[in-house]
């Protein structure tokens, strides 16, 4: 038996302990806790990484979405379309902005929003689309942008699981009006607490988002409007700056593990994740689908293998939305996948031996 955790944040810290510890001590010595050089330094570095002119650091990925929506003028009376299978933040941010989430089913092969179903849900009140690059696979942005242009909609990309993913030579977050990132510790680029950022090429939007995330502030004690308090803190910015140079290597390690899963699980009949045509999946999660998921998870656990489910309840089925009257029949794919998706262990430090053990054990369980 080989122990395979679902992820291993401690292993990553051990590998870069010196860089992290130095960065943290430096912020504390400078007392640059909110704003200041650590934050502006990270914002510049992340904008360069993302390939955008601007980056606005915020408190977390959920606020990133909410701030982008509000700064784009979306609020009460408006509808915003997102995908039926995601983390609640994708729709919660829409409600936080005062608008109404409208769910579109996911494509059966890609887990991302089904563009063929998208236009049918556009109404006179629709103002924006939030596509989610779920599990690290870019959504079909060229097709989504076509629909958005036809109907005059804003596009806010939920890039929380897709740092560094790209399509047609462009990184995710650069197709729409704004790209929203989470740096929750378990994400591909993770802080040591909550953190998030929004990238955009639009200088006016960047300025409005910065105000929104900082009490609508114009200057000290002068406020243009009531915003929220959701700033990126200095310690998290310093941790993120220390980690950013390693991200590309970590992504390649995830992709190497994904290729090995692909080889090891070939011939099982399982639908395996892969790159989109002309694009790059960054494997925040490596997700397969199976019947009898509970039994499989239990048998894997007995062999020392930890797995996850993302997500066990499709968004329209959440208790939080029970009163909204969403109809399960409108989301047949998401309804099926909530009962069948299984996330296998995936993290940059996973060894070949660990991946092989997962493949071997899973094949045995399925046989
Ligand atoms: C993590 C996540 C978010 C929210 O990020 P937080 O930093 O946890 O607020 C939003 N969307 C998706 C798809 C996520 O996975």
Image (cartoon, rainbow, N blue to C red):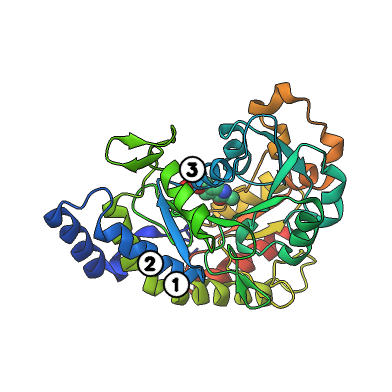
Residue 181 shows in the view: no
Distance, label 3 to label 2, CA atoms, is 20 Å
Give the percent coordinates (x, y) of residue 361: 62, 63
CB-based contact (under 8 Å), mark 1 and mark 2: yes
Q: Is residue 321 above or below residue 210?
A: above
Which mark is drawn over residue 298?
none
Relative to 347, is 214 on the left or the right?
left
* Label located before the other in sequence (1 or 3): 1
Q: Which residue is mark 2?
A: 44
Distance, label 1 to label 3, CA atoms, is 22 Å
- Is the residue marked 3 within 8 Å of ligand 1, measured from its CB? yes
Disc 1 on helix, strand or loop? helix
Q: Which residue is mark 1?
A: 48
Disc 2 on helix, strand or loop? helix
Q: Which residue is mark 3?
A: 63
- Is the residue marked 2 within 8 Å of ligand 1, measured from its CB? no
């Amino acid at each position: 038996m080989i122990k395979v955790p679902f992820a291993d944040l401690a292993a990553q810290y051990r590998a870069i302990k010196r860089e992290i510890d130095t960065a943290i001590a430096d912020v504390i010595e400078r007392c640059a806790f909110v704003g200041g050089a650590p934050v502006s330094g990270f914002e510049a570095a992340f904008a360069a990484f993302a390939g955008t002119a601007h980056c606005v650091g915020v408190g977390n990925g959920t606020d990133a979405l909410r701030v982008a929506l509000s700064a784009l003028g979306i609020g009460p009376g408006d509808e915003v379309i997102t995908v039926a299978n995601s983390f609640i933040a994708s729709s919660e941010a829409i409600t936080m902005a005062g608008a109404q989430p409208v769910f579109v089913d996911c494509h059966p092969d890609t887990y991302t929003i089904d563009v063929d179903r998208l236009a049918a849900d556009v109404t006179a009140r629709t103002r924006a689309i939030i596509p989610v690059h779920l599990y690290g696979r870019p959504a079909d942005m060229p097709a989504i942008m076509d629909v958005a242009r036809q109907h005059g909609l804003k596009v806010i990309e939920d890039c929380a699981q897709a740092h560094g993913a790209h399509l047609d030579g462009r990184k995710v977050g650069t197709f729409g009006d704004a790209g929203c990132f989470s740096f929750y510790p378990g994400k591909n680029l993770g802080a040591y607490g909550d953190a998030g950022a929004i990238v955009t090429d639009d200088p006016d939007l960047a300025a409005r988002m910065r105000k929104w995330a900082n009490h609508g502030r114009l200057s000290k004690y002068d406020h243009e409007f009531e915003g929220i308090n959701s700033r990126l803190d200095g310690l998290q910015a310093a941790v993120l700056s220390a980690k950013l140079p390693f991200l590309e290597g970590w992504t390649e390690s995830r992709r190497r593990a994904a290729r090995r899963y692909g080889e090891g699980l070939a011939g099982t009949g399982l639908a395996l994740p892969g790159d989109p045509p002309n694009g790059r999946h960054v494997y925040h999660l490596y997700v397969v689908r199976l019947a009898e998921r509970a039994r499989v998870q239990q048998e894997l656990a007995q062999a020392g293998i930890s797995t996850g489910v993302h997500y066990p309840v499709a968004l329209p089925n959440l208790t939080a939305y029970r009163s909204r009257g969403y109809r399960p029949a409108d989301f047949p794919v998401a309804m099926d996948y909530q009962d069948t998706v299984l996330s296998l262990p995936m993290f940059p430090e996973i060894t070949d031996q660990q991946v092989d053990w997962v493949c071997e054990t899973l094949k045995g369980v399925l046989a």
